[in-house]
Amino acid sequence: MARVRTSSKRCMVNPLKMSQPLGAALAFLGMEGCMPLFHGSQGCTSFGLVLLVRHFREAIPLQTTAMTEVTTVLGGLENLEQAILNIVKRTNPKIIGICSTGPTEIKGDDLVGHIKLIRDRHPVLDSVALVSVSAPDFAGSLQDGWAGAVTRMIEELADAPIPHARRSRRVNVLPGSHLTPGDIDELRDIFEAFSLDPVFLPDLSGSLDGHIPEEFMPTTLGGCSVEQARTMSSACWTIALGEQMRGAAITLEHRTGVPYVLFDRLTGLQCCDELLASLSRISGVPVPKKYRRQRSQLIDAMLDGHFYFSGKKIAVAAEPDLLWAWSRWLHEMGCEIQTAVTTTNSPLLTRIPSEEVVIGDLDDLETLAQGADLMIANSQGRQTAGRIGVPLFRVGMPIFDRLGAAHLMMIGYRGTRDLIFQVGNVLMAQSHEPTPASWIPPMENTDELVSINLPH
């Protein structure tokens, strides 16, 4: 069992974590026709907007209530009301996701009460879903904000169950923030191969997968629709992906009566076996042949790669669910998790295959990763890796110095197989294989050697 320690520094020297409002906004970006709204200052919104644009390399819809020092002290009702009305007038969204920030949380703005009052004043908002989430950026991290936003969407959008309205092939899927749009695309293919009809809440693969629309849209370009969210009570099962989604799955079960099953990771052999076995039981469909072949390919990749993974010391820094997924499969490949640094607390941390897990920053990682063979972190860790001379493999958010971050696929048999090749190639590049001359014995007596080899 790993020992969990919180860094005792008085400040973050080189931050690893992203804020709760950013995670909440990211979840809202997975909804169709959505406009995320930061209830805070313009600076809070600008920082989040720049980070999302750099990571996804797409136009990101994100608005702000533009709170100032005076309006923060006096209360943000007027700013919130004006922002919502302007957004509805100019962009005609189907849903507005309202995320609180540090200043408004400290002031104690009652977002739920404000929204009720605004709706009473303006009947034009009856056709727009307004979902607010408490997301103080001085506590928690990105995955906490994501989980909070998904839970609030379930509370506000999911309708009560209708008797005899269950669909035997419909499943709700609650993906965690550690899954990329590419991961969700792969999951959709897996579910549909079992003749299941998945509804992802939220669905980043529809809105942030890098496609070019036929015409400009001021809101999100795709994702889970409000109508799909309202019919989640008709599903036969809910599948939650990541420990961060346990609370949302429980909320959905209490609200709709739909039972749930949770998978804390999908990178690795055993966890993928468990997922496909569960889908086969739910659907009554045998595991398709293509996944049996993919499983065989993954096992072969594990055999090919274990020579280069075995005994390697790895330093991992990521959000808890991503840290858990990566540390577990690296451990299964024979690596030693020398250092594990994360952003916030989680029940998974004590199960990380490392002696210690530090809730800290990249400065802690730099201190603890000395002598490691590989560092796993986001692009913010590139200077740290450079200073200590350790190669960096980029995962998580943000990744702004490499292309294709949204299309990384790291789950399932195929995703795990490809990760073995990608990470294994980095480890191979660091090894110094002997040249042919280094293992040929020195020929001190050439004449004698030649005479032995000549035929009689």
Image (spheres, helix red, strand yellow):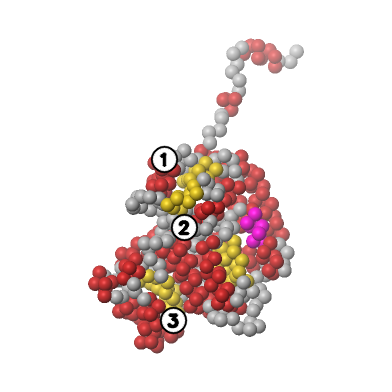
Per the picture, the main secondary structure of the magenta-coloured stretch is: helix
Q: Label 1: state its secondary structure.
A: helix
What's the mark number on residue 306? Answer: none
Q: Residue at x 55, y 67 (%)?
A: 174
Q: Amino acid at mark 3?
A: Val
Relative to 377, is 438 above or below? above
Q: Is 309 displayed left or right of 75 in the figure?
A: right
Q: Amino acid at mark 1?
A: Ile
Q: Residue at x 68, y 62 (%)?
A: 277
Q: Residue furthest left?
A: 70
Pointer 1 residue? 388
**Which region of the structure is painted magenta?**
270-276
Q: Do the residues bearing badges 3 and 2 touch, measured as CB atoms within 8 Å?
A: no
- Residue 130 in percent (x, y) is at 43, 78
Relative to 146, is 349 above or below? above
Relative to 446, is 120 above or below? below
Q: Report, in whole angstroms, how far the alpha carbon at label 3 lies from the one at label 2.
A: 35 Å
Instruction: Give the mark, 3 or 1, whose residue is nearer the N terminus.
Output: 3
Pointer 3 residue? 128
Instruction: Give the mark, 2 or 1, whose residue is nearer the N terminus.
Output: 2
> Magenta span has 274?
yes
Q: Amino acid at mark 2?
A: Asn
Pointer 2 residue? 345
| Within-10-Å neighbours for mark 2: few <14, some 14–19, many 20+ | some
Q: Report, in whole angstroms, how far the alpha carbon at label 2 lies from the one at label 1.
A: 27 Å
Q: Is 181 displayed left or right of 7 in the figure?
A: right
